[in-house]
Image (tube, rainbow, N blue to C red):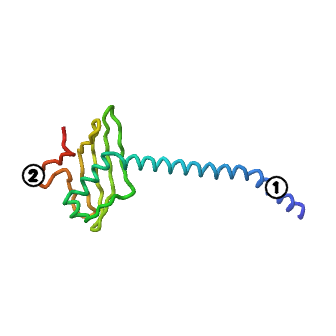
Amino acid sequence: MSSSRLTLAHLAEHVAQELRPWALAWCVGGMAVIVMATGVGLLLHWSMRSSGAYQDALRELRRHPAAAEALGRPIEEGWMRKGSIMAHGRSRLAKLAIPVSGPKGTGMLYVEAVEHPGEWRMQLLQLAPATGARIDLLAAASGGARPRSAARD
C-alpha cells in the first residue's frame, strides 16, 4: 500500500511539473488579451469622445434651457457611451447615445450628425430624461428654428 501511495505521489508531482509551464503560459496569455482589449476599448472611447459630433452635441445640450430644466446644472456626461462614427468617402456619419446627468436627474442624449469636410451638422439631437418625454434640442425656443451649428443643407 505504501508503494502505491509513493507511485501516486510521484505521478502527481510529475504531472504538476509538466503542467506548470503551460499554466504560466495560459495566465500570461490571458492577461495579455485582457490588457489589449482594455487598450482597444479605451482608444475607441477616447476617439468617440474627442469627435466634433460628440463635443457639439454636449455643448448644445448644456446651453439648452429645457435640458437645464430637466436635469439641472451642471450637466455631466456618463461613462457608458454607445454609438459609432463611420466614414463614407469624404464625409462621416455619427450615431451616438450619451448618458448624461445633473442634480435633478439623468437621461440619454441621442445624436445623429453628418460631417462634411470640417463641419458637423446635427440631424437628430434629443434628450430622453429618465422621467418625462424626449426633448428635441434642435428646435429652438423661438418658432422651431434650428441653431446655426445644427442647420441642414
Residue 130: image location, x then y, percent: 28, 63
Q: Is residue 152 left or right of residue 120?
A: left
- The image quadrant where one finds the N terminus is bottom right
> In terms of image quadrants, where is residue 11?
bottom right
Residue 89 spot, x, y in % from top left = 33, 31
- The residue located at (30%, 35%) in the rendering is 91
Q: Earlier in the sequence, mark 1 or mark 2?
A: 1
Element assignment for label 1? helix
Which residue corresponds to the image point at 31% horizontal and 62% vertical from the top-left? 101
Write down the residue under mark 2: 143
Looking at the rendered image, the quarter that the C terminus falls into is top left
The disc labelled 2 sits on which kind of residue? Gly
Where residue 123 appears, as percent x and y from the top left, is 23, 44
The outermost residue toward the left is 143
Q: How many marks?
A: 2
How many other residues sit within 10 Å of disc 1, few (<14), some (14-19) or many (≥20)?
Answer: few
The Cα atoms of the two marked residues, 1 and 2, are separated by: 84 Å
Which residue carries the number 1 mark? Answer: 11
Closer to viewer: mark 1 or mark 2: 2
